Amino acid sequence: MRLFAIVAAVLVAVALPLTPAQAQTPEPAASQLDDVVILARRSGAPMWTVTRGDSTLILVGAITGIPRDLSWRPDDLEAAAARSQQILTPQVGQASFSDLFRVIWRIRTIARMPNGQTSADYLTPDWQARLEAVMADERNEDWRTKSLLILGFDLMQDKAGYSRRRGGDDAMDVIRRAARRARVQTRPVGTVRGDELIDSLITAPQTAHVACVEAAIAAAELGPDAARDRAEDWRALRVADVVASPIDKALNQCWPWGDPEIAPQLRQQWAAAIETAMISPGVTMGVAPIRLLAEEGGVLDALAAGGFEVVGPEWK
């Protein structure tokens, strides 16, 4: 079931609907623009603004797995999103029924090691010893024969306290909800073909997931506080600390962001969407994984290198 949750997080069969009636929304007055920016900043979510002429881009750095009891102000972010002219959201996967059937048909290949193999066949003795220490309290030995990809996600969730969907609302949830309620035009920055995603899952050798499981082990060694510390850093606008957190490092190494063919495609689509937003009049809000925005050579670095003034918290 956890495998299906991982795949479902990426394979979204239908994008959020566009609302053509909103496409000709009048350009905001200066006071309205200020209100949007002030509301977004007051929410507590890390955000940056870039302005060129009559085009303003608000970039919100999101994380998943926010604890339910973490206090921030999502209502303000929702109000800011509702006043935007359009909203950029992450990519969607164009999955067909045949793609999903392929996952079911090849579930054993994706979820388990090849027959007779264990994690010790792929990890160095040092990393295997660290894994053994983390898993010492497990009641059974099933983890030894799980695929390294699934083991990596298990380590993050069961040991490091990271929960993708059972936590509180994250910035992506809030902005998407605001867009639906206010009928703001929402545009995914791109699509990824479901067959490409499934191929990367089915054909990748276990060695392709070694970096993922090593990063997940490092996160798991910190225990359940790893996820809370990351969320606290996010709320406190300690952006560099979030990007450098063991959980974000692991997410960046694990599928799909760790896939050498899919990850560049995802990054290029965001770069193209932001370039388009900077020539579109009005206020565009974009919500993206914070590591995509603030990583070395990421979106914010590219904007700064392009001569734009990026206003917001330090990201280095």
Image (cartoon, rainbow, N blue to C red):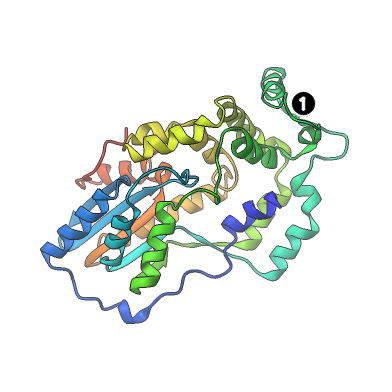
Residue sitting at 58 percent across and 68 percent down? 13
Q: Which amino acid, by three-letter code, is at mark 1?
A: Ala
Foreground pick, 94 / 40: 40
Coordinates of residue 48 in the picture (x, y in percent): 27, 48
Task: From this view, report whether residue 157 is shown above or below residue 3.
Answer: above
Residue that protrudes farthest toward the left in the picture: 30
Residue 296 in view here: no
Coordinates of residue 213 in the picture (x, y in percent): 64, 33
Residue sitting at 27 percent across and 65 percent down? 84
Q: Residues within 10 Å of mark 1 (few under 14, many from 20)?
A: some
Residue 163 in view here: yes
Name the quarter where the C terminus is drawn: top left
Task: From this view, report whether residue 113 is shown above or below residue 15.
Answer: above
Q: What residue sits right under mark 1 in the picture?
A: 120
Residue 79, quarter of picture: bottom left
Residue sitting at 19 percent across and 46 percent down? 309
Residue 307, quarter of picture: top left
Residue 254, quarter of picture: top right
Coordinates of residue 22 in the picture (x, y in percent): 31, 77
Using residue 272 as the reference point, say whether residue 13 is left or right of it: right
Coordinates of residue 166 in the picture (x, y in percent): 55, 50
| Dot 1: element | helix
Using residue 247 as the reference point, say whether residue 135 is left or right of it: right
